[in-house]
Image (spheres, coloured by chain):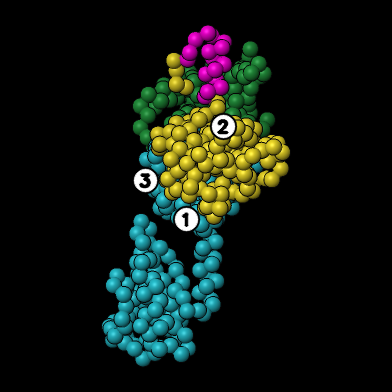
């Protein structure tokens, strides 16, 4: 499948590599060209320097034919905006976004976005490891 | 002895209330000054500023009554007022400006926050912004 | 009216000041401590320190009873999220977002934020008003509709010189509101006659703009 990832930080780079290794067609967008160093010289996907919330950039990156979109930039709001553009304007079937702030994640999940909060997940994992049980709370 | 004609004493139901009222009244007696005791109800922004807060109002009235009793014991007059404001510090400063106050007497309790003595937020604000003289009385430990 | 202004930069500050001057209750939300102090010193106790895109902070700010939230930070994406959280989580009846990139007007509208203000657009339209051209200069869009107020300046050799308004073939759903001649506004009637150099202010649906332009400039 053709996947667009915006944000080539640690998670973005790792995700891109995983997808390429699994045989998918990957395009990574980032504002800074040096961030692509994280992909390594053997990266078999495509990269583009550009702003993931700019429609012209997204079109050039092929969003009209993307089947999946991952928003993993450093900024929650940028991710939220990009994911909504992908989902509601370009109807990309599978859109996932990272939102660190648990409350914002809540709000946008309720709006229909597939949002992952590393804050929430991380705390849950630590909780289970420390107490030996799954947390029943949705904090 | 310093001159003061209009003294403002904010009270909040602390152990220091009696002390500051007595101090202000004593000074007023010598100078023939007027003393104003106020209690400020802090209204959260989730409510309108003039919202009816019955519990807080009753508590405030009780605090002011007690102050009046202290004044009665020494046979002096005390003017009291119950206010609602977003923050206590600015409300005290505004009252001081409006009433032409020349001395504020403030009481603080001995509080610790994160293991350190803490002045709270009202006292520093009043000390920084009051248009007149300020006396701060800290309770004994 | 209770207005929350998210962003205590120049725009937020002056907006807050104007609203306070008009007698409204205002709260500015700003994340930089120094700005917070400066605003408090100038405008009084009307500023809260924090991030306006955080629901918990908006809750403390009384967003539940706000009549309007104006998101005027310097970042379009932050303004989008602030307005969306205010609307969806707190049911704030009106939200206004400042946008720097005019292209975002369309995106915001598609994502449910109707009222956006782009100073870039405003400045562009002011510039265009000064330059005579054969185009309609959009002045204002009437909110929640696709009706625009447009400005057409007839050139010095206009084919419409001497034509009465009633004889103009205007597209449907267009209304000439005012004709400005030598700086004087004329409230037109059907018999009002157009002259070269007239500035015509018309209300029209966006879809009819091209037909309107042809009517004014090509004597259609």
Identify residue for label 1.
C105
| Residue A54, placed above or below residue C64 | below
Label 2 resides on the chain identified as A
The one nearer the camera, C204 or C16, is: C204
Looking at the rendered image, the disc whose residue lies closer to the viewer, 2 or 1, is 2
Quick one: quadrant of the C terminus of chain C? bottom left
Q: Chain A is drawn in which colour?
A: yellow
Label 1 resides on the chain identified as C
In which quarter of the view is residue A111 placed?
Answer: top left
Relative image position of residue A109 (x, y in whole percent):
43, 33
Q: Is mark 2 on a helix, strand or loop?
A: loop
Q: Is the magenta stretch mostly helix, strand or loop?
A: helix
Q: Residue at x 39, y 45 (%)?
A: C67
| Residue B18, placed above or below residue B37 | above
Q: How far apart are marks 2 and 3 (CA)?
A: 47 Å
Q: Which residue is drawn at 40% across and 76% down?
A: C213
Looking at the rendered image, the disc whose residue lies closer to the viewer, 2 or 3, is 2
Q: Which chain is cyan?
A: C
Read off the magenta span: A120-135
Q: Residue at x 44, y 68 (%)?
A: C139
Q: The green chain is which one?
A: B
What is the tally of numbered marks visible in this picture? 3
Identify residue for label 2.
A22
Examine the rendering and report whether any part of residue B26 can be seen: no
| Residue B75, placed above or below residue B92 | above
Q: How far apart are marks 2 and 1 (CA)?
A: 38 Å
Identify residue for label 3.
C93
Relative image position of residue A123 (x, y in whole percent):
55, 20
Label 3 resides on the chain identified as C
Looking at the image, which residue sits at the far front? A23
Relative image position of residue A55 (x, y in whole percent):
52, 52
């Amino acid at each position: 499948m053709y996947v667009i990832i915006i944000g080539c930080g640690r998670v973005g780079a790792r995700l891109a590599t995983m997808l390429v290794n699994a045989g998918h067609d990957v395009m990574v967008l980032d504002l800074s060209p040096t961030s692509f160093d994280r992909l390594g010289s053997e990266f078999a996907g495509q990269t583009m320097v550009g702003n993931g919330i700019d429609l012209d950039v997204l079109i050039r990156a092929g969003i009209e034919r993307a089947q999946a979109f991952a928003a993993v930039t450093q900024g929650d709001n940028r991710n939220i905006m990009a994911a909504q553009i992908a989902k509601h304007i370009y109807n990309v079937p599978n859109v996932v976004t990272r939102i660190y702030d648990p409350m914002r994640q809540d709000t946008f999940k309720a709006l229909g976005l597939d949002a992952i909060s590393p804050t929430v997940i991380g705390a849950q994992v630590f909780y289970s490891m420390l107490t030996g049980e799954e947390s029943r709370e949705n904090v | 002895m310093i001159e003061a004609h209009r003294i403002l004493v904010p009270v909040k139901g602390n152990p220091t209330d009696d002390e500051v009222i007595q101090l202000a009244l004593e000074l007023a007696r010598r100078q023939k000054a007027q003393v104003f005791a106020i209690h400020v109800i802090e209204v959260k922004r989730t409510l309108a500023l003039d919202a009816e807060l019955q519990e807080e109002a009753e508590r405030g009235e009780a605090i002011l009554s007690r102050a009046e009793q202290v004044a009665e014991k020494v046979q002096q007059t005390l003017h009291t007022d119950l206010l609602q404001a977003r923050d206590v510090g600015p409300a005290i400063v505004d009252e001081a400006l409006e009433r032409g106050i020349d001395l504020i007497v403030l009481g603080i309790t001995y509080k610790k926050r994160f293991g350190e003595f803490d002045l709270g937020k009202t006292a520093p604000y009043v000390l920084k912004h009051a248009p007149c003289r300020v006396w701060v009385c800290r309770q004994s430990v | 009216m209770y207005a929350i202004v998210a962003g205590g930069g120049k725009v937020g500050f002056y907006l807050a000041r104007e609203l306070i001057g008009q007698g409204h209750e205002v709260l500015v939300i700003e994340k930089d401590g120094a700005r917070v102090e400066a605003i408090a010193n100038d405008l009084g106790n009307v500023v809260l320190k924090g991030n306006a895109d955080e629901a918990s902070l908006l809750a403390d700010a009384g967003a539940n009873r706000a009549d309007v939230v104006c998101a005027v930070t310097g970042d379009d994406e932050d303004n989008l999220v602030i307005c969306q959280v205010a609307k969806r989580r707190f049911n704030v009846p009106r939200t206004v977002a400042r946008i720097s990139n005019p292209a975002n007007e369309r995106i915001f509208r598609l994502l449910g934020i109707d009222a956006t203000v782009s100073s870039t657009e405003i400045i562009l339209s002011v510039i265009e008003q000064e330059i005579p051209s054969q185009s309609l200069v959009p002045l204002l869009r009437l909110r929640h509709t696709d009706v625009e107020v447009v400005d057409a300046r007839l050139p010095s050799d206009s084919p419409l010189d001497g034509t009465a308004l009633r004889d103009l073939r205007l597209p449907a759903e267009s209304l000439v509101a005012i004709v400005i001649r030598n700086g004087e506004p004329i409230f037109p009637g059907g018999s009002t006659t157009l002259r070269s150099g007239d500035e015509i202010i018309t209300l029209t649906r966006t879809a009819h703009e091209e037909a309107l332009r042809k009517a004014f400039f090509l004597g259609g």
